[in-house]
Amino acid sequence: MGTTMTMNRVIHAAVRRDLDRLESALAAFPDGDAERAAALHRAYAQLRDQLHHHHVGEDTHIWPMLAGFGVDAGLLAAMESEHHAMAESLTSVAEALDALAADPRAALAATARVRVADAREVVGQHLTHEEDALEPALLPYLDTPEWHATEKKLRTAPPRVAGEFFAWVQDGMAPEHRAFLHASVPRPVTFVLGRVLGRRYHREVAPTWRS
């Protein structure tokens, strides 16, 4: 049986994409390039914000809903514990990029790259665990009133926040993920949110990954 595509997997792909991009950018960091260090700092802040928002939604809305349906409490506790481990690892990356922004030496970029590699492993393990174990537990409830109410809460965001999300998630998106997104959200909506309300992302973050 094939994998069921979900918005969760689309978001996970964007997270993996940015961690890969960041590690590659740090491996090629030009010694003394303050502008590049600042750009990587901004791009990482965007990724961290998106991942934080995603996990707050899960912790606040999805896990309690699944608990209400009697989904394995041990699995939900593991998800929450992994979120905490990820937050610690991502904070370690942020501290390394803070240091690089303040002093853009190649040696500090190398240190930051190691932190990113460590974070990729921690994050990747959680994302895979969630896809393999949590999503199958969620799928039976996707047509329930409880899920529809939860989904509505997850989609509630100020226009600017929604715009930055759609700009971020579509940047370098794989064709199968783009097809799923357009099947789930009308194309004019993703365009207006991603290109118009998400213009700060296109101005301040997207160019970082083109350099």
Image (cartoon, helix red, strand yellow):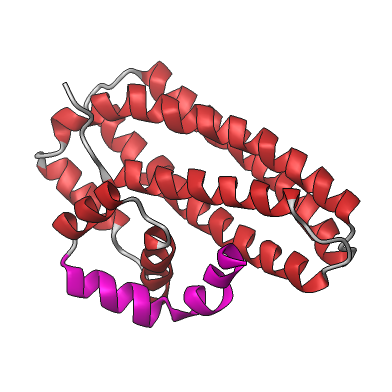
Q: Is residue 188 left or right of residue 165?
A: left
Query: What's the magenta region?
Result: 186-211
Examine the structure image and report whether residue 151 is included in the region drawn in magenta: no
Q: Is residue 163 above or below residue 55?
A: below
Q: Name the residue rendered at 90%, 58% in the picture.
A: 105
In this figure, what is the number of numbered marks?
0
Q: Name the residue rendered at 58%, 76% in the picture.
A: 204
**x then y, percent, for residue 29:** 77, 57
Q: Quadrant of residue 69?
A: top left
Q: Is residue 115 above or below residue 95?
A: above
**x then y, percent, for residue 83:** 53, 36
Q: Quadrant of residue 58?
A: top left
Q: Is residue 178 left or right of residue 42?
A: left
Towards the viewer: 34 or 77: 34
Q: Name the residue rendered at 44%, 80% in the picture.
A: 199
Q: Is residue 75 above or below residue 201?
A: above
**x then y, percent, for residue 62:** 32, 40
Q: Quadrant of residue 134?
A: top left
Q: The C terminus is located in which quarter?
A: bottom right
Q: Is residue 188 left or right of residue 8?
A: left
Q: Name the residue rendered at 16%, 21% in the picture.
A: 1
Q: Is residue 47 above or below residue 137?
A: below
Question: Majority secondary structure of the magenta segment?
Answer: helix
Towards the viewer: 141 or 40: 40
Q: Is residue 56 visible?
A: no
Examine the structure image and report whether residue 194 is included in the region drawn in magenta: yes
Q: Is residue 34 left or right of residue 195?
A: right
**x then y, percent, for residue 34:** 82, 71
